[in-house]
Amino acid sequence: MDMHSFLRSRRSVRRFQAKDVDPAILHRILESSFYAPSAHNRQPWRFAILTTSEPKLRLSNKMAAEFEIDLVREGLSVADINTRTDRSKKRITEAPIVIVLCMDESEMDKYPDLRRQGAETIMAIQSVAMAGLQLLLAAHFEGLGGVWTCGPLFTPEVVKTSLSLPENWTPQALLLLGYPDENPVEKKKKNFRDLVININ
């Protein structure tokens, strides 16, 4: 498979086999993610790795409780709320590896004005996102499936406290990894001509 075909073959996988991932494979995946580009080469990404059931269950229960509050505010029925929260918990607890992708701004540049400081925060977020994508591609190379979920953006403090993360780590995403137990079909992509313009 050529490189472009490989990159285009990655899919979001949400169902995994009940099969452990060799720690050496996980180590290689994480190390490769560290080679992503980052603003000022500050490498603001941080990873909390969950491979055992207890922290996964604790995290999923805490996040589901917050999710339920939001769904009640939206006016969903009890049945719909239970379906959605149960599905959310199951995805976390059944994934062989759960990675909490976090951002640490402590080594980023500091500015006296909100405009530039806000831009610096965005740079850190972009850097973390690139490391997350590199991680998913490295996992794909190793024959693993994975999916990026953004739940921590809605409950960062809950994620942080439930896992006792360092104070300067801000949760950005959950990456769920494992050997695929599904073969997702390719989703239709937007038209190239609608997304690209040439400026002359």
Image (cartoon, rainbow, N blue to C red):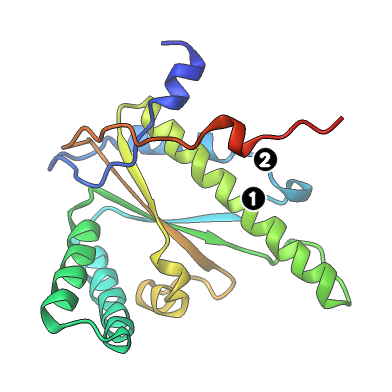
Mark pair 2, 1: CA separation: 7 Å
- Front residue of 74 and 144: 74
Residue 152: x and y in percent read: 42, 68
The residue shown at (87%, 30%) is 200
Q: What is the three-letter code of the residue carrying label 2?
A: Pro
Mark 1, secondary structure of its residue: helix
- Front residue of 74 and 69: 74
Query: Residue 37: which disc?
Result: 2
Query: Residue 127: which disc?
Result: 1
Q: Is residue 20 above or below residue 97?
A: above
Query: Residue 164: which disc?
Result: none
Q: Give the crowd class for mark 2: few <14, some 14-19, many >=20 residues within 10 Å.
A: some
Residue 63: x and y in percent read: 31, 74
Describe residue 156's horizontal placement relative to residue 80 as left or right.
right
- Front residue of 182 and 189: 189
The residue shown at (10%, 78%) is 79
